[in-house]
Image (cartoon, grey):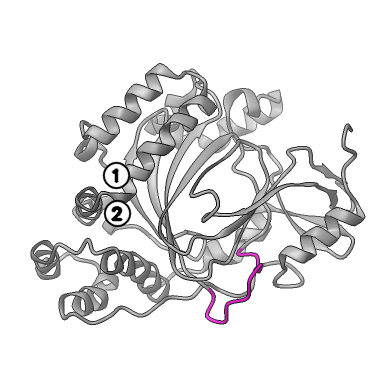
């Protein structure tokens, strides 16, 4: 995905200056939130984001799966990257129903800004998580519970477990990601030779116990869910297996429907440009029905989030989390 389109855009230049001025990553995030809100309110900028993706060969060739949150790219460099994510609602909405397992983003810090829709509800957990490697029973403590209406811009720290609950209505966020600290190894992520050696390199890093120093995920990465009076861990690869394998034309259509809903409802449809996209012979088939509806003035219908996840119970709710945390809390000063 080319980054040149926005390399010298005023918003990106401001973020790059903050990135230079604030070596400390949490400080960088704390100052960047206001810029994200400006981006999300700037319709001309968002039109340019749409064009930047629809003109990009990499984005058009994107292989969507149910594992992917539908997105648009904005910008990426060694130190930070920016995307727009889309979150559909449940068809039969129930407040407090989890959209996925409790998880963290390894060594990445995320600042998210709500820019369209109802926003979602989220819960953060204490970073200290105790997993019994034999039974996978886990102890966790809830640290914060809030909605995006209360905190339209918020930051989730590296290694901080959290969960998102289904939004009442289709919602969109702008997301800024950085590693938890600047490392000399950060540039290696984009080195094509080292990418080809990714698994052998990881094995050496794990063998030396250097994953946190280098800034990669742990050899065993867990996600969690409540089960009665305790939490249970599930290996990330096991949890994501079904959704990573769920690909095909229907998933492509669903993913792009989310993108086009945003274009239509946000009022950022550049009709002349979209007519030109419609005439291109290489425009992906998954774009066409939504392009036609938008160009013909028809309302693109809502998409819906899947209502079950890959755990034995298939779903869980906020009250289930509180029950598990209350019955088996972590010691406050442990």
**Is residue 93 covered in magenta?**
yes
Circles 1 and 2: CB distance less than 8 Å?
Answer: yes
Sequence order check, earlier mark of 1 and 2: 1
Residue range (magenta)? 90-99
Q: Residues within 10 Å of mark 1 (few under 14, many from 20)?
A: few
Q: Which residue is mark 1?
A: 1
Of 270 and 217, nearer the camera is 270
Quarter that holds the N terminus: top left
**Residue 284 occupies quadrant:** bottom left
Quarter that holds the C terminus: top right
**Is residue 264 covered in magenta?**
no
Q: Which residue is mark 2?
A: 59
Q: Is residue 180 above or below residue 83?
A: above
On the picture, is 43 further left or further right than 324?
A: left
On the picture, is 226 further left or further right than 310?
A: right
Q: Which residue is painted at 18% across and 80% down in the image?
A: 297
Of 245 and 76, nearer the camera is 76
- Helix, strand or loop at mark 2: helix
């Amino acid at each position: 995905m080319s980054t040149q389109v926005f390399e010298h855009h005023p918003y990106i230049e401001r973020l790059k200056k903050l990135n230079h001025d604030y070596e400390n990553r949490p400080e960088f995030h704390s100052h960047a939130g206001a810029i994200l809100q400006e981006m999300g309110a700037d319709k001309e900028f968002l039109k340019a984001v749409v064009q930047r993706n629809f003109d990009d060969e990499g984005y058009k060739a994107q292989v969507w799966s149910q594992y992917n949150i539908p997105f648009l790219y904005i910008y990426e460099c060694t130190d930070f990257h920016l995307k727009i994510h889309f979150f559909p609602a449940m068809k039969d909405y129930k407040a407090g129903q989890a959209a996925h397992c409790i998880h963290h983003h390894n060594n990445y810090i995320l600042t998210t800004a709500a820019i369209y829709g109802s926003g979602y509800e989220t819960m953060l957990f204490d970073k200290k998580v105790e997993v019994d490697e034999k039974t996978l029973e886990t102890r966790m403590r809830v640290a914060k519970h809030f909605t995006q209406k209360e905190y339209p811009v918020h930051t989730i720290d590296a290694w901080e477990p959290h969960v998102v609950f289904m939004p009442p209505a289709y919602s969109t966020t702008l997301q800024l990601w950085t590693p938890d600290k600047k490392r000399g190894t950060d540039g290696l992520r984009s080195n094509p030779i080292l990418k080809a050696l990714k698994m052998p390199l990881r094995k050496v890093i794990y063998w030396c116990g250097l994953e946190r120093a280098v800034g990669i995920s742990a050899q065993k990465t867990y996600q969690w869910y409540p089960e009665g009076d305790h939490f249970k861990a599930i290996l990330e690869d096991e949890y994501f297996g079904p959704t990573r394998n769920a690909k095909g034309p229907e998933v492509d259509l669903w993913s792009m429907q989310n993108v086009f809903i945003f274009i239509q409802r946000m009022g950022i449809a550049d009709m002349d440009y979209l007519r030109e996209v419609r005439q291109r012979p290489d425009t992906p088939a998954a774009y066409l029905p939504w392009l036609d509806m938008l160009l013909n003035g028809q309302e693109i219908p809502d998409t819906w989030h899947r209502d079950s996840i890959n755990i034995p119970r298939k779903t869980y709710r906020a009250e289930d989390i509180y029950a598990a945390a209350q019955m088996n809390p972590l010691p406050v000063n442990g």
